[in-house]
Amino acid sequence: MKILIAPNSFKESLTSIEVARCIARGLKKASRRFKIMELPLADGGTGTAQIITKAFDGEFIQKKVSGPLDDKVTASYGVIKEQGVAVIELAEAAGLRLVPNQKRTPLNTTTAGVGELVRDAIERGYYKIILGIGDSATIDCGVGALSILGVKFLDAQDQEISHNCRGLLDLKKIETSAITRQVRRTKITVASDVKNILTGRYGALVYAKQKGAKRKDMPLILKALRNFKRVIAKQFDINLDKIPGSGAAGGIGGAFAALLNAQILSGFGLVQEIVRLEDEIKTSDLIITGEGRVDQETFYGKTLKNVIDMAYIYRKPVILIAGRIASDVKILKRYHVLEQYSLIKTSRSVKKAISDAPKLLENIAYRIGRDLLLSSQ
């Protein structure tokens, strides 16, 4: 039996590479008869740079940049010298994992460090940039990052606004004349993990709660997003709500598209082509996939749903392992999902499930392996 292990990362716990390794270890413990293929995935979030860079034998650069709370963090990004490509993850400089629980509020976090990474790559001569924007702690519409790249965001008195969501409330005018020729000539591909637009029912606000927003913050955030959309429409004649993915990572996707002519692509689509996921699914007998949390948001272009869809096309059975599975995902039963396993259900608390994730994954995979052996007898 050939088993394909193709998970996404478990946010704030394990990378997809680590998840795949733990599952493989458990299966091997159950039996050496399984033919196991580890194929860790990413969708523009955590792990994207590592997977793409390693696929092309690239290398990594480390740099100290501004974090989401304006403190300094050490971030890394990949470079593929032969192709002149830099692969940057927003999460390295503005990811949720960089913000302690008690300090989480997307009103105050910034993407400035993301701009510093992009600028560093350009200064090193990398004029093709893949920017993965998943797993962000921000809803600043990219003003932090873009301000580093020469864009000025001004209030009614022609003063720079604060480079965060709260500052967007004061935005009146955007100036792009200071963007350098090097930045303008750079081809930026935004790898997005979702297709959400900036405002509306399925806009960027959908993800505010998971970034730490309280109920009282929601009207302010929505007002800030609408104001940014209005200014962009007025000055550049671009309706951000017509661009799929413009609301990803708190609006940075749409901002880069509007102001730097970036192209927004599916992060999963980009990665799955590079690692040849479809070919591996075709030739496998069973797919094991998963991610940290599975809920209704999973169905908006997320990696796990894409893997399940692809497996369904080729009539391959799927086993799902997740940190937590919400009660509203019974729809997965329609897609040849044989079993669903949740780490939370095998642990005393969420905190414990996160800290014990490697062992829990290994144990679940061992049980899966033993069950497969019994069913084949």
Image (tube, rainbow, N blue to C red):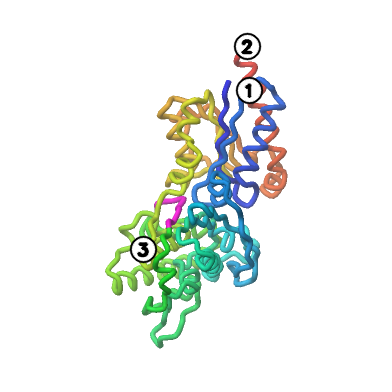
Q: Nearer the viewer, residue 30 or 328?
A: 30
Say which residue appears at 61% left-offset and 28% top-offset.
Answer: 36
From what the image shows, is residue 266 above or below residue 283?
A: below
Residue 91: x %, y % from top left: 56, 58
Nearer the camera: disc 1 or disc 2: 1
Residue wearing tag 3:
261
Instruction: Examine the rendering and report whether any part of residue 296 can be seen.
Output: no
Residue drawn at the location 36% of the way across and 63% of the way down: 261
Residue 22 in the image, given as x and y percentages of width and height: 67, 37
Crowd around label 2: few <14 · some 14–19 · many ≥20 (10 Å): few
Residue type beneath disc 3: Asn
Within the magenta stretch, is there residue 191?
yes
Q: Nearer the viewer, mark 3 or mark 2?
A: 3
The span from disc 3 to disc 2 (Cα, nearest Å) is 58 Å
Q: Which label belongs to residue 377?
A: 2
Going by the numbered disc 1, the residue's amino acid type is: Phe
What residue is drawn where x is 69% and y is 46%? 349
Q: Is residue 194 magenta?
A: yes
The first of marks 3 and 2 along the sequence is: 3
Residue furthest to the top in view is: 377
Q: Residue furthest front?
A: 82
Spatial CA distance of label 3 from label 1 is 47 Å
Cα separation between marks 1 and 2: 14 Å
Mark 1 residue crowding within 10 angstroms, few (<14) / some (14–19) / many (20+):
some
Q: Check if mark 3's residue and mark 1's residue have beta carbons within 8 Å.
A: no
Q: Which residues are magenta?
A: 189-195
Quadrant for the N terminus in the image = top right
Residue holding disc 1? 34
Mark 1 vs 2, N-terminal side:
1
